Amino acid sequence: MKLRLGPQPLEWIDRNVSVTFDFEGKRVTGFEGDVVTSALWAEGWKVLGRSFKYHRRRGLMSFANHDINALFQTAEMPNVRGDVTPAKNGLSLTAVNTFGSLENDKGALVEWIAKFLPVGFYYRAFYSPKFLFPKWERLIREMAGLGKINTNWSEERQPKRYRHCDVAIIGAGASGMAAAIQAAKQGVDVCLIDENPFIGGSLDYQFANQRSQSLNRQYLKETVASLPNIQVITSAYVAGYYGDHWLAVNTDQGLIKLSAQSVVVATGVFEQPAVFRNNDLPGVMNASAAQRLMARYAVAPCNAGVVLTANHEGYRAALDMHENGLIVKAILDTGKTEGVWVDEAKKAGIVVYEQVTPIEALGSREVEGFIFGLNGMEHRLDCDGILMSVGWAPAGAPLYQAGAKFGYEPEVQQLIPVSLPDGVFACGRVNGVYVMEDRIKDGEQAGLAAALHVKGDAIPEWKDFRDGVAHSHPYPIWQHPKGKEFVDFDEDIQVKDLKGAIAQGFDNIELMKRFSTIGMGPSQGKHSNMNGIRMLAKLTGKTIDETGSTTARPMFHPTPVSHLAGMRFRPERVTPMQLFHEEAKACFMEAGNWLRPEYYPTEATREDSIKAEVSAVRNAVGLVDVSTLGKLEIFGRDAAELMDRLYTMRMSNMAIGASRYALMVDDAGVLIDDGVAVRFSDEHFYVTTTTSTSDSAYRMIQKKVIEWNLMVTVLNRTGQIGAMNVAGPNSRKVLSKLTAFGLSNDNFPYLASRQAKLAGVDVTMIRVGFVGELGYEIHVDASNALMVWDAIMNAGKEFGIKPFGVEAQRLLRLEKGHIIVGQDTDGLTNPFEANMSWAVHFKKPYFLGKPSLMKLKQMQTRTLVGFELLSDAEKDQPLESNLLIEGKEMVGRVTSIGQSDTLKKVIGLAMVSTEYSAEGQELNIKLSDGRLVKAKVVKTPFYDPEGWLQKSNEGSGEAA
Amino acid sequence: MSIQIVPKAFPVLMHLRGEGLDEVLASLGTSNLDIFQYRFVANGQFVAKLGNEEIFVCVEQPLDISEEKKQYAFQRGDAIFELSGDWKGLMAEVCIYDFRQTQPGDFLMVLIAGVSAWLLIPEEGAPLVLGCDPTYGHYFYETLVRQLEVSPFLKMECQDDD
Amino acid sequence: MKFVTCPSLGKRALSEFTYGGRYEQEPAQETVSEKEWADYVFYHNGAPKVQIEWWYHRPTGIWFLFERDTLTDRINKVDFARKGMTHEA
């Protein structure tokens, strides 16, 4: 283990447990607690990946998942991020974006032709001719892709979980912990979230060897642990902030949707690289990356390094190396930094050069040296590592997403939040506060403010804890005549690329981003946007505030689609007769959110089974489950008034024990629902609605009761009542076996409803036409519905009873010319178009949509007609929605069609221009393949037009 | 603390609407119920108040109500389940509601896994009784059971208890 | 997902509600002119404003009226929709 250090005071690794995995076919051994990157680096693997465009060797850079140099892949998974993925036994990883291997990548040849591939090259070179683009695209994707997707995927869904708290705190560093403590002391529920496996933040790496901070560390961590109203969520990142203080918190287990009343953003900062030639050589890294390596994993960044710095944090990193026995060749200060750590470093004997200009890193595979300018001279230092400490950018994603505004604060040379939305607070380094004691105070004030916001109390005046010292270099960019100074490591963007983009006129931050693709790679600008903004500002002569910054949109890190998808909650309803249907092996179809039997496969084919069901109804008796109908009870003093107002027909004159067709339109006169209304008593009605409208009709009626100020109650009993329809010439005989109630035409005529005992339980029976035969609709409490159904099936055996499904029902009803609201009608159809002017009673003083219907009656342009097909049905049966054509004009469309065995014809309904609606009119139906077939308008109902069968059954000679 | 879900049979569930239901509440010994509160009256039987003119009862004793008094009773066959253990852990995955605001004795009507449901919020440690429209019963049960089986959150919490 | 605090229900997610349109007085059918009726049914001014809206809480079946600012999507006031109420629409 070449670079593993001795024990560190706060290390995360367990030296007693070793972990072994494969990388590029070679064995790697680390410790439990290592991440992939730290285990590789400890063994001296400095080349971890190849760059996206030029296939340059890349090593550890941010070591915080802010760059994708350390991006790997397993057989199943691309996008394995080495900086944060735990090293696990049995892992088998390869680098991405290589041809051949990581060491010998043929793609690196691209670098030799790089000058022919300027930024924006792909867009301009391949955009036209357009027909060639797909070819180029395939080639480019092959060359430039990041990893391979396993195309033998299977659907994976991770549950999501809701969580509620009063104050959510993002980031459990010093200021976040302080905020949590202060908020919790106010008695509110606090969630403290950190993307690392342990809380502590930079206190545990930047200050790991700073003995004076151990008291702060101990106080903060122990207090957080001791307060029961602080919930700590670690190894979880906030993928996005959404309105009303919702946070999408991604964890290994899945997404937590965290709802808070107030949010404290203590996310800290992203360290930004210095931009100089070959700053991407393996061995060049951010100083904070080196500190994380040492403090968390006890891994040396290098053996003998230089520290390029523009702030005192760089001196701390040099001290950390020094105290670990590593050689610091020199601290190269771009200015003249002051501070405690500067003094300590000098006291420790570390060589410090001030006013240094970085020129280039040297090395073929890895860093071998560094050239810098000092007093007008070039100097060279041999080293195997370069630590960069030139500045920071706020980790402001949640703040941007919440709607915070950022402004540039020249004192700290950093963007800081200048206006925050209601209930959102920022503290610590994201707020430009750097001194540890101040960070704690800033956190305390934010935590207190958040808690007070939750309680609705006044928030004390906000104090500024910034120390007035610049912690970032105002322009850490040093162009080199030979280039290769990388601004964006994901996208291989160099200084000249951005200069080129600006020169070509893409000099607005949003344009420059999109043209150059800076910040558009997988790390989304975490290490590159700030330098890009600094360049754009300088080159356009604007301030950084004038230049602006781009919004950091969700997700903060790439989040698995399975986590976003979550589980699927798709409520599915079944009727009380489901058990029968399942035992009868019914084929089911979806009707709204219901499952309904489409047909019962009693014959060899679907068609024959449906035919047999139809035939049973027409010739013997059938039973259909209509429990999916909406069922509403309407009762109270104004029940009749409500019925009159809701439906187009008059309902208040219905006799007790009668039923009536009920048609409803909306304000615009559009037909929205139909059903059957039954009157139980003066003040008690019972109505059915179509399957799909039961919820919306109920909702709307409740609303109208309020608007109209009526003394009436509406109850939705859809799921509490089972319903079935016994239909066919033998239906009366079947029911007679199950009830003592007189079913004769005199006692129970057509369109009457009766409450009686059937099969020993209370039921409501309605004599409706439904499928055009003698028939009874039976409504019964859901708990008794299956029993009644079974009783009818048993009683019907001797009369040839068959259960029938939706397909048979539709065909039977089509033969009667009955419409299906929503299929034969569309979003504009009114009752006149549907041939239902008989159902509109204009004499009523008021009903829903009446003014619209009065107008529409005078301007009818289309009509629903019945038609029969004239050509050979076998070959040429049209489909629903096929168009009707006259000359070159479209004059209508087929809304329903079916092959009627009863009538030996193909029949259907069509919505046509009224001028083509006369009986006998020939229609041309355009088939899906473009051919025209002939049909003829005929009268409906197609079957038993006088309705003898359903009314009295006299048509079949049966005695009532 | 593992979570158990079992279907539960309730003998007589009635939805009452109409006038003068306070007398009915009084006759059941629950006259001081507030809206959206319930009370157990005897071995698993309960009474819940849903509004000034609306109550939901699960009692075996006959109720003295009639349409003449403008009182209407409707039998209900809700699917009912009992959840024991960390029921709030399971609810967190199927229900957006913030359970911090409930008290034992609350009759909570809320959307769970896309279905309207009612819950009898229990005393700490006691099982939760919840119900929904009978036609959603199988979906409701299967969804909760599947969630218990697949949820890594719930698995993790069970391990934490060991 | 917004939360709305409602009387009797407490803090509820908006996903439990169904929107029911703006609160509006229907013109008297007997006397309404064609233009007034068409305005009521079809012509809705979508300019941002504070308006009263119908919202239906599905689990309880209760209609509420929310006073909502359509510019900021802030709900200022929540009340039961009661029979016989009068509101400035």
Image (cartoon, rainbow, N blue to C red):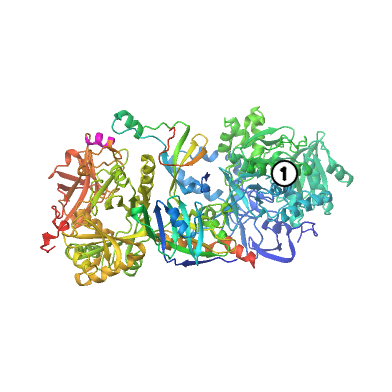
For the record, the magenta segment spans A851-857
Q: Name the residue under label 1.
A: A443
**Residue A66 visible in the current orientation:** no
The percent coordinates of residue A737 (x first, y second) are 22, 70
Q: Does the magenta run of residues contain A852?
A: yes
Q: Does the magenta run of residues contain A91?
A: no
The percent coordinates of residue A606 (x first, y second) are 27, 64
Q: Nearer the viewer, residue B100 or A545?
A: B100
State the quadrant of the C terminus of chain C.
Answer: top left
| Residue type pointed to by label 1 | Gly
When asked about the image quadrant of residue A813, the answer is bottom left
Q: Is the magenta stretch mostly helix, strand or loop?
A: helix
Q: Residue furthest left?
A: A957
Above or below A346: residue B132: below
Left or right of B46? Residue A206 is right
The percent coordinates of residue A435 (x first, y second) are 78, 42
